Image: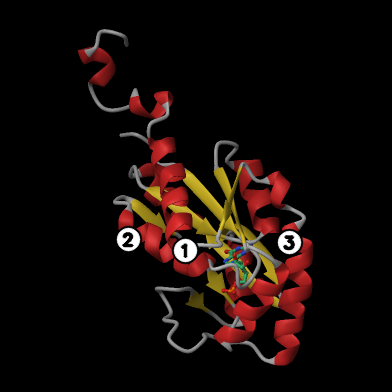
Amino acid sequence: MERGNLFIISAPSGAGKTTLCRRVLKKIPDLVFSISHTTRSPRAGEISGSDYYFVSSEEFDRLVCEGAFIEWARVHDHCYGTSRKEVLYRMEHGLDVLLDIDIQGAREVVSIFADAVTVFILPPSLSELEKRLIGRGTEDIAELQMRLDNARKELRAVEEYEFAVLNDDLDRAVTDFTGIVLAFRNRTVRTLQRPGLAEALQIG
Ligand code: 5GP
């Protein structure tokens, strides 16, 4: 079986990453979302086991000690971790896996999976980012300010990413991101892993 690809998507809070990911996941078969663990409290409408696994700090520390995470990081004062089991099992079963993680996590994952594909989602401007963050109304003033300060720092990391998708128009950003995922499915090395293809073409 062909091994799936890892897609890492990062963006500052408010860049529209969650909506974008949801749309892309609906469009592309065999692309699955890696559900992270977090110590952050759920926002209205968020479901444990769907958006995140919401856990206590004690439970998170226990999972860290057990080696349950490929990477974990403290982001905006909360802990977030990528489940090793969840990611590896799915990749081994030929699924492409989408990781929505911050820049620290992205650096860590790329150091382990050198062929992971990195995509940064850019908002059209800082003022638009601020407007979107205030508009969604999910953070209190202190958390909002911290997320905006962090956004300025995170944006400087964009050049570390292979792709940068500008989210000034959601439909176009969805098309662009979808294109990246599909292009990687057609890499020669991956296509030639299809069972029996190289033999059928007598190029194996
Ligand atoms: P939020 O609290 O807005 O859902 O996420 C805050 C930040 O944490 C986002 O940048 C998101 O990409 C990042 N994040 C979510 N899950 C993980 C994870 O498992 N590892 C790391 N390093 N960052 C994560």
Classify residue 76 by image quadrant. bottom right
Q: Earlier in the sequence, mark 1 or mark 3?
A: 3
Q: Quadrant of the N terminus?
A: top left
Crowd class of label 1 (few under 14; some 14 to 19; many from 20; radius 10 Å): some
Question: In the visual, does 154 lie left or right of 6?
Answer: right
**Kind of residue at badge 3:** Glu
* Camera-nearest label, 1 or 3: 1
Spatial CA span between label 1 and label 3: 21 Å
Classify residue 195 by image quadrant. top left
Q: Residue at x 73, y 59 (%)?
A: 155
**What residue did someone put label 3 on?**
154
Question: Where is residue 145 drawn, in percent x and y?
Answer: 76, 82
**What residue did someone put label 1 on?**
170
**What residue did someone put label 2 on?**
26
Q: Is the Cβ of the residue at disc 1 closer than 8 Å to that at disc 3?
A: no
Indicate the quadrant of ligand 1 in the picture: bottom right
Residue 68 seen = no
- Label 2 SS: helix
Q: Which of the two residues, 58 or 152, is positioned nearer the viewer here?
A: 152
Q: Earlier in the sequence, mark 3 or mark 2?
A: 2
Question: In the visual, does 192 lie left or right of 14?
Answer: left
Crowd class of label 3 (few under 14; some 14 to 19; many from 20; radius 10 Å): some
* Camera-nearest label, 2 or 1: 1
Tell me if residue 125 comes above or below residue 76 in the rendering: above
Spatial CA span between label 2 and label 1: 14 Å
**Kind of residue at badge 1:** Leu
Q: Which of the two residues, 107 or 54, is positioned nearer the viewer here?
A: 107
Q: Is the Cβ of the residue at disc 2 closer than 8 Å to that at disc 1?
A: no
Crowd class of label 2 (few under 14; some 14 to 19; many from 20; radius 10 Å): few
- Label 3 SS: helix
**Kind of residue at badge 2:** Lys
Tell me if residue 90 comes above or below residue 193 in the rendering: below
